[in-house]
Image (cartoon, rainbow, N blue to C red):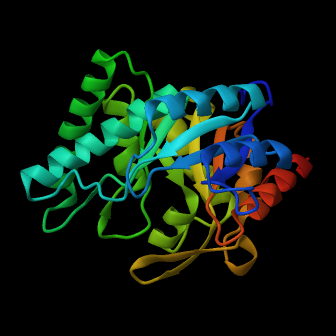
Amino acid sequence: MNSGKTGGLLFGTGGVPVSAESRSTEAGIERIAELGLGCMEVEFVQGVKMRPEVAAAVGELAARKKIALTAHGPYAINLNAVEPQKVHMSKERILQTARIAALFGARSITFHAAFYLKDSPAQTYAVVRKHLQEVVNTLRKEGNKVTISPEVTGKPSQFGTLEELLRLSSEIEGVMPCIDFSHWHARTGRANSYQEFLAVLDMVEKKLGRRGLDNMHMHLSGIAYGNKGELRHLMLAESDLHYTELLKALKERRAKGIVICESAPYLEDDALLLQRTYRELP
């Protein structure tokens, strides 16, 4: 990833920009480069349907345009499902995402790992940890070095608190958190001030060391939420998220990595807003 060359953070979109010529991944990369953004997340949310030869071509284009790529796995993942077949297919979907992502040079993949269902957070954690360790073991045997980054989730019914993911990342080599600051704000009703953002980043460093802040995979968007957490994504201007305060905290802690904007509907507009705001900070 080329964030080191840019001195910190790369900003981009979750999926192909709305203004791209077509909905293809290649058109998305071309548009990201035209806009002057630095990264894009390839969305496999409905399934991993990219052929290996296409992934290789995507990787070549991204390298030529100097665009860093990540990937988002399918929504149909629940490592804590009751039915063994659903758990098996969940692991397969993570593996499929990582295998294709490796072909196009992605640094990390993210996904929503599990639901608690009727289990306690502690029970769910043990199950998720076991399955993720097996996934990582399989990938490493294949020589696949893509980082597995379960996402901070936006609803209390979902596994994926900041604490859970930081603990997983400290216990399984090859796992790092994807910190969705909008989800965390929606889930907690807090985490929306400069000091709170600093506290999150300090938690990351305390648990994972400086490498945790040097290799961040982040999501950010406007978000609507209620007493059950996340409702839907919005544009930043329509939300109450104090994104400038977050960017100040990221700059203060010298965070490096990727910021994927998932605002709706004009995700590239907010990605450009975030990049411009960050660059204008003192």
- Does residue 225 appear to the left or right of 129 in the view shown? right
Give me the residue at 20% from left, 47% from top.
Answer: 89
Q: Is residue 104 above or below residue 193?
A: above
Give me the residue at 66% from left, 53% from top.
Answer: 13
Give me the residue at 16% from left, 45% from top.
Answer: 88
> Which sits in the foreground, 25 or 98?
25
The percent coordinates of residue 252 (x first, y second) are 75, 43
> Which sits in the foreground, 56 or 110?
56
Give me the residue at 10% from left, 51% from top.
Answer: 85
The percent coordinates of residue 181 (x first, y second) are 57, 59
- Does residue 23 appear to the left or right of 163 in the view shown? right
Residue 105 visible somewhere in the drawing: no
- Does residue 200 appear to the left or right of 246 in the view shown? left
The percent coordinates of residue 176 (x first, y second) are 44, 36
| Quadrant (top left, top right, bottom left, bottom right) of the N terminus | top right
> Which sits in the foreground, 147 or 72?
72
The percent coordinates of residue 163 (x first, y second) are 39, 50
- Does residue 127 appear to the left or right of 115 in the view shown? left
Quarter of the view holding residue 64: top right
Furthest-bottom residue in this view: 226
